[in-house]
Amino acid sequence: MALHIYNSYTRKKELFAPITPGHVGMYVCGPTVSGESHLGHARPYVTFDVVYRYLTFKKLKVRYVRNITDAGHFEEEGREAEDKVSTKAQLEKLEPMELVQKYTNLFHWAMKQFNCIEPSIEPTATGHIVEQINMIEEIIRQGYAYEKNGSVYFDVKKYAAAHDYGKLSGRILEDLLDAESRENSVRELDGQQEKRDSADFALWKSAPPEHIMRWKSPWGEGFPGWHIECSAMATKYLGTKFDIHGGGMDLQFPHHESEIAQSTICNHTSPVNYWMHNNMITINGRKMGKSYNNVIKLTELFSGEHPLLTQPFHPMTVRFFILQSHYRSTLDFSSEALAASEKAVKRLWEAYNTLLKLPVTDNKQASDVALDEKITNWLGELEEFMDDDFNSAKVLANLFEMAPVINSLKDRLIPSESISSATLQMMKDKWKVFLEDIFGLSGVEEGNSELLQSVMQLLIEIRKEAKTKKDFATSDKIRKQLTELGILLKDEKDGSTSWNLD
RNA sequence: GGUCCUUUGGCCGAGUGGCUCAGGCAAAGCUCUGCAAAAGCUUCUACAGCGGUUCGAAUCCGCUAGGGACCUCCA
């Protein structure tokens, strides 16, 4: 089976065929760096990180572009106050780029925590003002945009007459056009009055005097509309037509719909072959989002400092939590669910470490053919599952099926000759590839320094001596106090003792 | 008001026409152990309701009910 991707545009799973054989161009909508990232933001970046890793595993050379939205159209934190006190000295004033830098750094830090591979190109909106202006000019030249009071709007009605506007988001044109006739009319947007139709969207916005972020343009000082940056940067780095465009489902409309319209006019071709949208993370069944006032920031998640959290959670736990469901399903957050993931990922990771340590003997013939076949099947399915629109949940389920086998091999509950050495080696290889290379998981142990290793070795020896002398008071004391310190001792079947951090 | 999606066992979550079965967490029993922990084995609770299509439906269709998303910034 070859890779199939669910295309939001056609609402079907389709065979993935890159435009340029062997190469993939992928654009993912990045963060708006006007505030701290929260758990909801983690989902697309983890999801598309796995997509990126899997395509790479499939021997495809991927150019992965993920933008940083740092321009104009967002309300910077503290803006309101700033607007009122513009008489301050330069250094006392709020410098927008300072905020942008702060939240960009924080975002990069979070991505690192999650083990997300850096994109090939991470362009910023402010760094591509010229490209955006050029694109707007071209759209005006072709008669699909108009200028009004220093702002430029895209003419949706004109575009829709000859194009499929609304197809991606499943919108009905009549509903969008002349929306004022609707009962629940749109909320007041800036400049609503100067648009020819309320469905038109801004390509360039004239900046009021107090607006801090502003650039010169043929239409006066202002800042770019939200949608144009992605079109401009995607075109610049991936060409007029590229393979995959990803983002959250909530961006389908109006953002991605507008991207299609802009690029189609400017480049005379629809920009994207496969549209991929991840679903939302919910909390108590409701989408996590700023406007719902129910966000859990990533820093809070990692520290456990939030009323809804009973404990801190490791980034790998969160990553695993995301991978345990399919990216197109909503995923409901709760401290309980995350705690379950924490235990699960720990168990899986320990099985993985155990597997790596199993000695590969020269066993050509499996004595338990049924088991050997079962394992081979489980391993073979891993790629099939990923090929079926990145079904990471099924891959994990199969890995869990193998965990008891691995543990039993270690404890000799299953004799080592039961499976062939080829199968064992394949198991080692596949686990490594899927857990580390594709899922991007890593161990959660910290502070595993050489010094600690030696100290632990010493304690284990002392305890062993006590046990031999049947001095269980001493041996239990060591174990109990270590447990209180967060170190768990395990007496193995072969008489040795292992330990790990809780 | 419009458009679309969703409802799976105590919890989280795969699954889309048939086969013994997702998986994880929790719970119970047993084995191992000086005792634990870990591990292993076993058990357990499901497809919102009603109707239809079909030899056969959690899976397809219809209705009812609940939940949600988008239509406005949003991952």
Image (spheres, grey):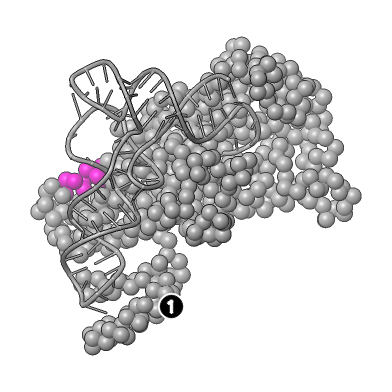
Q: Position of residue A392 (x, y in %)?
A: 37, 43
* Residue A326 left/right relative to A272: left
Residue at far top of view: A161
On whether residue A374 falls in the magenta region, the answer is yes
Residue for badge 1: A451
Q: Secondary structure at mark 1?
A: helix
**Residue A412 located left or right of residue A264:** left
**What residue do we see at 40% from left, 60% from top?**
A443
A24 up-or-down from A10: above or below: below
What residue is shown at x 42% (from left), y 71% (from top)?
A486
Q: Nearer the viewer, residue A379 or A411?
A: A411
Q: Position of residue A283 (x, y in %)?
A: 51, 45
Q: Is residue A453 above or below residue B57?
A: below
Location of the C terminus of chain A by quadrant is bottom left
At which x and y percent is residue A415?
Answer: 14, 60
What amino acid type should be assigned to the residue bearing mark 1? Leu
Judged left or right of residue A281, residue A438 is: left
Is the residue A482 above or below the residue A19 in the image? below
Res. B36 image quadrant = bottom left
Q: Position of residue A91 (x, y in %)?
A: 83, 56
Segment tinted magenta in the rendering: A372-380
User: Which quarter of the rendering shows the N terminus of chain A?
Assistant: top left
Query: Is A219 covered by the magenta stretch?
Result: no
Residue drawn where x is 54% and y is 40% of the image: A287
Give whichever of A287, A58 is nearer the camera.
A287
The residue shown at (72%, 33%) is: A224
